């Protein structure tokens, strides 16, 4: 059956007929009747086939953008960070582990007592160690889990010389669950049985961890309800790999640390090395989502989906630090690239990540209106507290470094950068950079930046009368902007006396 044309399809058909490819600054969304207040806009989306987002934004896999602190901040805001691969495998795996262990709904090594310990001894130890909790798992002398002590057991005990075994709830009456139980399942079990602790068992008698209802509640409610979590209640994180054979071992090390998504970093995703690598990676890791890219043409998108990509990253040269298009003469303006690729992916269930070129908050609703499911940003987050690197002081102002992964310095420093541009066998003196090294003003915390960018997205969705990103995909329509239209859209003909946090003069 023929698919019904959406307003966005008609708009891009006209552009194509006129031989015009457009980027974010060239187009603006049409407004319409709206019963959606900005606060009612729902920003949840998908990063890959199986990994969701609470806000549609990811931080770029760049050595001046994403290591563990950025990935933690992104996941806590509801997005995801992609840890760059310009570092040894062991360090990258450690960065992933730092994110995964940042929140610990599952207590891996719960404090235990021995069945022969007396109540007096246990309470004295509790006081000495300043433990706040009253519940203890009880092991026998062979290390087998034999029972549970709770606050109630201590309360009812009149004789401190009784042992843990005398007053505990024996294992036969304790609600337990298998080692691999997810956080959601654990909470459901605890609610069903009215218990607030859930010991996790490996085989019948070996303790493999524990869930506490309080910890799960803390993670799932309040400000933490916004966190982007995996099914075990850990922050979600992605990590980059290149396409060398050794990157299969890198991927293995990342998977062992429970990375949620592997992102293949290649300036030209529709290239022989990436196809070969994607196929091998897919074969080895059937249950982890893989992002392939970067590309900018619909046929490339189709090919990567066919090879098994779980999301496709679109963007060749739109980035703030990119010189690829100037150096090599390639590349589609980003809005057209995103639209064309989103149409190529349609029906496959594979989300599109619009990578690079986001400058102002309004670029995000435009990118999503073109068909992207999320955006990836480097420059927007560069200069924040959570990025790697120190603050640089110049003329009394604070800056941080932000360099392209294809800049001369990144390529000189890192094999991963040379490999991204297929120059890993090129002598250093003959490297051809495709990016620049820059500094950007220090911006403070990531959260501050995201509040403005997500506020802009909410506002855009409200103007369009769209409650969800799926609505925006369905309803989005655009005006083509003339140069005067672009000028009109910025503050003009005034002397700005106060620059707001979401506006930069000259952008
Ligand atoms: P923004 O615009 O957010 O772009 O700063 C970030 C994205 O740019 C890509 N990237 C590069 N592209 N030369 C390029 O052509 C480079 O040196 C370079 N470094 C990063 C990358 O996809 C990133 O997510």
Image (cartoon, rainbow, N blue to C red):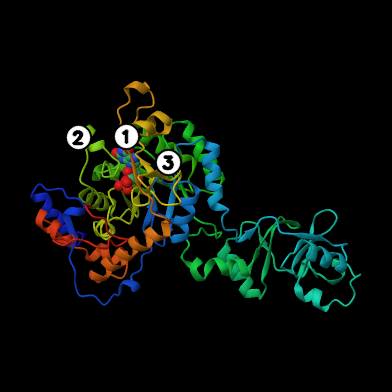
| Front-lying residue, 42 or 25 | 25
Q: Is residue 426 left or right of residue 31?
A: right
Question: Do we see residue 81 in this rendering?
Answer: yes
Q: Which mark is residue 63?
A: 3
Q: Quadrant of residue 216?
A: bottom right
Residue visible at 52% across and 47% down in the picture: 96
Residue 447 vertical position relative to residue 174 in the rendered view, above or below:
above
Residue at the spot of label 1: 271
- Report the label total: 3
- First in residue order: circle 2 vs circle 1: 1
Mark 3: which secondary structure? loop
Residue 409 vertical position relative to residue 33 in the rendered view, above or below:
above
Residue at the spot of label 2: 329
Residue furthest right as drawn: 161
Mark 1: which secondary structure? loop
Q: Nearer the viewer, mark 2 or mark 3?
A: 3
Residue furthest left as drawn: 18
Label 2 crowd (10 A; few <14 / some 14-19 / many >=20): few
Residue furthest front as drawn: 396
Marks 3 and 1: CB-CB under 8 Å? no
Q: Position of residue 104 (x, y in %)?
A: 60, 58
Question: Do we see residue 308 in this rendering?
Answer: no
Label 3 crowd (10 A; few <14 / some 14-19 / many >=20): many
Residue 451 vertical position relative to residue 37 in the rendered view, above or below:
above
Question: How much space separates mark 3 and mark 1, taking CA atoms?
Answer: 23 Å
């Amino acid at each position: 059956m023929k698919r019904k044309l959406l307003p966005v399809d008609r708009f891009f058909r006209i552009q194509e007929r006129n031989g015009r490819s457009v980027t974010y600054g060239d187009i603006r969304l049409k407004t319409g009747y709206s019963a959606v207040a900005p606060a009612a806009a729902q920003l949840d989306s998908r990063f890959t086939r199986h990994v969701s987002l609470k806000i549609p934004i990811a931080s770029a896999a760049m050595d001046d953008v994403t290591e563990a602190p950025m990935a933690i901040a992104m996941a806590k805001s509801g997005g995801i960070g992609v840890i760059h691969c310009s570092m040894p495998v062991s360090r990258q795996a450690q960065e992933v582990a730092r994110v995964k262990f940042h929140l610990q709904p599952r207590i891996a090594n719960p404090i235990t007592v021995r069945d022969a310990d007396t109540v007096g001894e246990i309470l004295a130890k509790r006081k000495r160690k300043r433990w706040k909790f009253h519940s203890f798992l009880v092991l026998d002398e062979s290390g087998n889990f034999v029972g549970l002590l709770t606050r109630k057991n201590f309360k009812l005990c009149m004789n401190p010389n009784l042992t843990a075994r005398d007053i505990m709830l024996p294992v036969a009456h304790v609600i337990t669950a298998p080692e691999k139980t997810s956080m959601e399942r654990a909470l459901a079990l605890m609610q069903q049985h009215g218990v607030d602790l859930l010991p996790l068992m490996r085989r019948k008698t070996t303790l493999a961890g524990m869930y506490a209802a309080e910890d799960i509640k803390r993670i799932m409610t309040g400000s933490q309800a916004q966190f982007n979590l995996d099914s075990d209640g850990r922050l979600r994180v992605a990590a980059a790999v290149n396409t060398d054979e050794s990157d299969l071992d890198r991927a293995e090390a990342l998977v062992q640390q429970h990375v949620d998504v592997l992102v293949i970093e290649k300036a030209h995703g529709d290239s022989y090395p990436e196809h070969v690598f994607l196929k091998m990676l897919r074969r080895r890791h059937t249950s982890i989502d893989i992002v392939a890219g970067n590309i900018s043409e619909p046929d490339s998108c189709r090919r990567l989906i066919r090879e098994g990509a779980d999301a496709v990253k679109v963007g060749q040269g739109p980035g703030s630090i990119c010189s690829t298009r100037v150096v090599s003469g390639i590349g589609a303006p980003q809005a057209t690239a995103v639209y064309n690729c989103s149409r190529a992916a349609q029906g496959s269930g594979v989300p599109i990540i619009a990578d690079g070129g986001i400058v102002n908050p309004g670029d995000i609703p435009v990118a999503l209106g073109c068909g992207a499911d999320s955006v990836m940003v480097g420059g927007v987050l560069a200069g924040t507290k959570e990025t790697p690197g120190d603050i640089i002081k110049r003329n009394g102002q604070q800056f941080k470094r932000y360099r392209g992964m294809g800049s001369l310095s990144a390529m000189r420093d890192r094999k991963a950068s040379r490999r991204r541009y297929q120059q890993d066998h090129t002598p250093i003196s003959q490297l051809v950079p495709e990016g620049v090294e820059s500094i950007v003003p220090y911006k403070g915390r990531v959260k501050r930046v995201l509040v403005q960018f997500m506020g802009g997205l909410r506002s855009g969705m409200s103007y369009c009368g769209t409650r969800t990103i799926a609505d925006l995909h369905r309803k989005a329509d655009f005006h083509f902007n003339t140069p005067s239209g672009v000028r009109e859209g910025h503050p003009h003909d005034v002397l700005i006396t106060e620059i707001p946090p979401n506006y930069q003069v000259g952008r």
